[in-house]
Amino acid sequence: MSRSMIIPFGPQHAAYLEPLNVALKLEEERVVGAEVNIGYNHRGMERALSMDYKKSQYLCERVCGICSFHHSSVYCQGLERIFDVDAPERAKLIRSILMECQRLTSHLLALGHVAESVGYENLFMQSFRERELVMWLVNRISGNRVHYSMNVIGGVKRDLAPEMEKEIANTMNDLRPRLMELHRIFSRDSTLRKRTAGIGKFSTQDARSYGAVGPVSRASGVPQDIRQDGFAAYGMIDFRPVVREEGDVYARMMVRMDECLQSVDIIEQCLALLKDGPIAMQVRGHPTGEVFSRVEAPRGELMYYIKAKGTLSLERIKLRTPAFMNVQALLAMMLGYQLCDVGTISVSVDPCICCTDR
């Protein structure tokens, strides 16, 4: 006769970099129930962001360190629509280049953690070695490794000199074969496949029911990518969403790996389209109106609702982050699998508690 028990998984656990707790109900080693508990990291960001709309273009980057530039971009994009200002084409292309650089750093971090969760320490180090190339590049572009502080309402505040454009192109040329080698390992390594293929299955119907976004939903056959809406310079870029049908840890891993190679392509397309011109439009006064603004962050759709009343402070700002949607999907992914798979399944969602709790 089997006996059930409830055990805590996190908030302090080797598989998690941030405080997430999952209460697991087990029968022997099999997961028969799960409850996600958050709230360890609440910082009152929405209240702080509403106090001064000018300072908030920098504060919103502190919501999350891994997708900080996307937070800044979606915020400035929303305010530009309220002010009825269109950022110059060159600024949009620079934004797209930096967004894809950040997608690379985020995905390589997630891939490294999947490898680490199954005990593949060497592959973890390889993933972070390639990530460091991009980290050095964005540091050269913006002067910062994590919070770029490049966006302003109306465009960007730093231009790309011809030497910097060449350096970006050279870095992408160096990075492509390295990513292809990583792709070969992630896709073909027999031990890694045994620990990820068929584990943490998440059906297309579940993805739609839970409102999952980003690589989590695309790995389950949902062809949704907000970049197709054409924000920033994506309307000028030729690309197709990366979609897989398996819906398991392996599929989520490979969607991110394929998107890394796609990001290199997008950056090269942006460089080819760069033309001389202004990088910012002048914005005056205080905003009045309300807007929904969306971008495709590395983890999926990032949405800001902004309501302004014509003063320095905003009347309301509401964030819906991709991690907030995807963390709940763990409830469906874990059921029926072994306790030893819980860490790998959790990491495959790429949870970010800074985004989730705010």
Image (cartoon, rainbow, N blue to C red):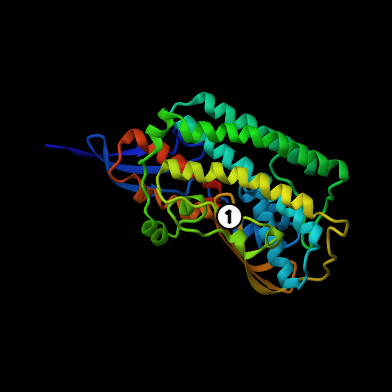
Query: In the rendering, at what x and y percent does residue 20 appear?
Result: 45, 43
Give the residue drawn at x 45%, y 32%: 117
Q: In terms of image quadrants, where is residue 314? A: bottom right
Look at 59% across and 35% down and name the residue there. Answer: 180
Q: Position of residue 2 (x, y in %)?
A: 15, 37
Of the 4 image quadrants, the one containing the N terminus is top left
Q: Residue furthest top?
A: 122
Residue named by callout 1: 44
Identify the residue shown where x is 58% and y is 38%: 108
Residue toward you, 172 or 75: 172
Picture residue at 40% right of the left edge, 49% below the top: 247
Q: Which secondary structure lies at badge 1?
A: loop
Q: Is residue 300 left or right of residue 58?
A: left
| In this rendering, position of residue 205 left or right of residue 168 | left
Q: Residues within 10 Å of mark 1 (few under 14, many from 20)?
A: few
Question: From the viewer's perspective, is residue 251 above or below residue 340?
Answer: below
